[in-house]
Image (cartoon, rainbow, N blue to C red):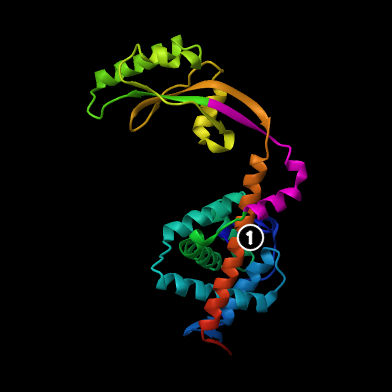
């Protein structure tokens, strides 16, 4: 579960909301104590008002249980040494404001006009950030998606199984640049790359052409789907015609280019697989989140007044 889940749905209502009456009275009667941490009537009323703005109808009961969960999240985060800074919360608050087309100041004003203090929203953001970090630290290595689960999910989305993907057959070529090479030497290597690219016409002749330059390593040709290459490289490959070479990229080894030996669009469910795997991973993460919270609640001392 992440802060984004509740940041989005329903908050657009906030822009147009006009709730009559002034701010809620600052009632301070203690309603629940969670491991010696009090939750007051004021806290519950504020959270209930926020929930209404975001489309929830659970009222005081839902607000109370959500606040109990947040206390446990923050206490567990503190035990784990996780600290959410004011800057972290400010950034998330700003992102939330931009999603409803407001500045942070205007979001605060809109909340106040609806009887909700900005601190109520900020506390919720802080707890969700801390919880997200806890979940990643504890469960990231445990999330496993089986091939059978992926296949079963794909069968439910047969309309996506016929998607196409771009397949590239490429040949990495490295113009070695020693670490201590000066500016003039680096400039010369760039000129070598430019000459190589202008004369290159076929991957079959890559090794022969490279032999005319010093310290050039021609790697074996490889075949990659678009989902298997970094976005910047995919963009460069898409811009480069077959039989040509991409522009040079600085790497730890020197100047690296890719000869495009072939590229073609093929029937592939790679994109659909990635989407399905993400969905399954999110579901697994949500289940782990619920188990973790049940564990924290089972250990906690929760005193309802």
Q: Quadrant of residue 56?
A: bottom right
Can residue 24 be seen from the camera position used here? no
- Location of residue 157 in the rendering, given as x and y in whole percent from the top left corner: 75, 47
- Location of residue 156 in the rendering, given as x and y in whole percent from the top left corner: 76, 50
Q: Which residues are magenta?
A: 147-169
- Is 304 or 243 nearer to us in this picture? 243
Q: Residues within 10 Å of mark 1 (few under 14, many from 20)?
A: few
Left or right: 110 in relation to 208: right
- Is 165 or 210 nearer to us in this picture? 210
Question: Residue lying farthest bottom?
Answer: 305
Q: Dividing the image into 4 quarters, which one contains the C terminus? A: bottom right
Q: In the image, is residue 59 part of the stretch drawn in magenta?
A: no
Question: Residue lying farthest top?
Answer: 199
- Location of residue 227 in the rendering, given as x and y in whole percent from the top left corner: 58, 38
Q: What residue lies at 26% left-to-right and 27% top-to-bottom?
A: 178
Left or right: 109 in relation to 185: right
Can residue 226 be seen from the camera position used here? yes
Q: Quadrant of residue 172?
A: top left
Q: What residue lies at 63% left-to-right and 52% top-to-bottom?
A: 147
Left or right: 231 in relation to 265: left
| Residue behind mark 1 | 283
Q: In the image, is residue 150 part of the stretch drawn in magenta?
A: yes
Compared with residue 234, is residue 150 higher up or lower down, i.e. above or below?
Answer: below
Compared with residue 101, is residue 293 higher up or lower down, i.e. above or below?
Answer: below
Q: Dividing the image into 4 quarters, which one contains the N terminus? A: bottom right
Secondary element type, mark 1:
helix
Q: What residue lies at 71% left-to-right and 53% top-to-bottom?
A: 152
Question: What is the number of callouts on the image?
Answer: 1
- Location of residue 203 in the rendering, given as x and y in whole percent from the top left corner: 49, 17
Compared with residue 301, is residue 6 higher up or lower down, i.e. above or below?
Answer: above
Q: What residue lies at 54% left-to-right and 20% top-to-bottom?
A: 261
Q: Quadrant of residue 190?
A: top left
């Amino acid at each position: 579960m992440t802060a984004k889940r509740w940041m989005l749905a329903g908050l657009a209502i906030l822009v147009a909301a006009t709730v009559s009456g002034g701010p809620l009275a600052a009632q301070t009667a203690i309603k629940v104590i969670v491991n010696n941490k009090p939750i007051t009537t004021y806290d519950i009323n504020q959270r209930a008002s926020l929930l209404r703005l975001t489309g929830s109808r659970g009222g005081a009961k839902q607000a109370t249980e959500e606040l109990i969960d947040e206390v446990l999240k923050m206490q567990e985060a503190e035990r784990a040494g996780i600290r959410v800074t004011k800057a972290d919360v400010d950034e998330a608050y700003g992102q939330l404001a931009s999603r409803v087309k407001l500045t942070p100041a205007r979001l605060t004003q809109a909340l106040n006009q609806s009887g909700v203090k900005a601190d109520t929203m900020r506390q919720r953001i802080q707890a969700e950030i801390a919880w997200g970090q806890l979940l990643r630290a504890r469960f990231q290595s445990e999330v496993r998606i089986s091939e059978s689960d992926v296949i079963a999910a794909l069968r439910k989305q047969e309309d996506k199984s016929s998607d196409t993907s771009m397949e590239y057959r490429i040949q990495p070529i490295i113009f070695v640049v020693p670490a201590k090479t000066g500016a003039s030497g680096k400039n010369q290597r760039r000129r070598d790359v430019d000459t190589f690219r202008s004369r290159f016409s076929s991957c079959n002749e890559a090794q022969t052409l490279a032999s005319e330059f010093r310290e050039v390593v021609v790697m074996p040709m490889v075949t990659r789907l678009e989902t298997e290459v970094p976005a910047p490289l995919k963009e460069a490959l898409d811009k480069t015609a077959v039989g040509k070479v991409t522009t040079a990229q600085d790497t730890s080894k020197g100047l690296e280019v890719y000869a495009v030996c072939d590229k073609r669009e093929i029937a592939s469910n790679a994109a659909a697989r990635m989407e399905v795997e993400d969905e399954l991973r999110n579901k697994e993460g949500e289940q782990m989140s619920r188990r973790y919270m049940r564990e924290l609640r089972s250990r906690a001392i929760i005193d309802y007044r």
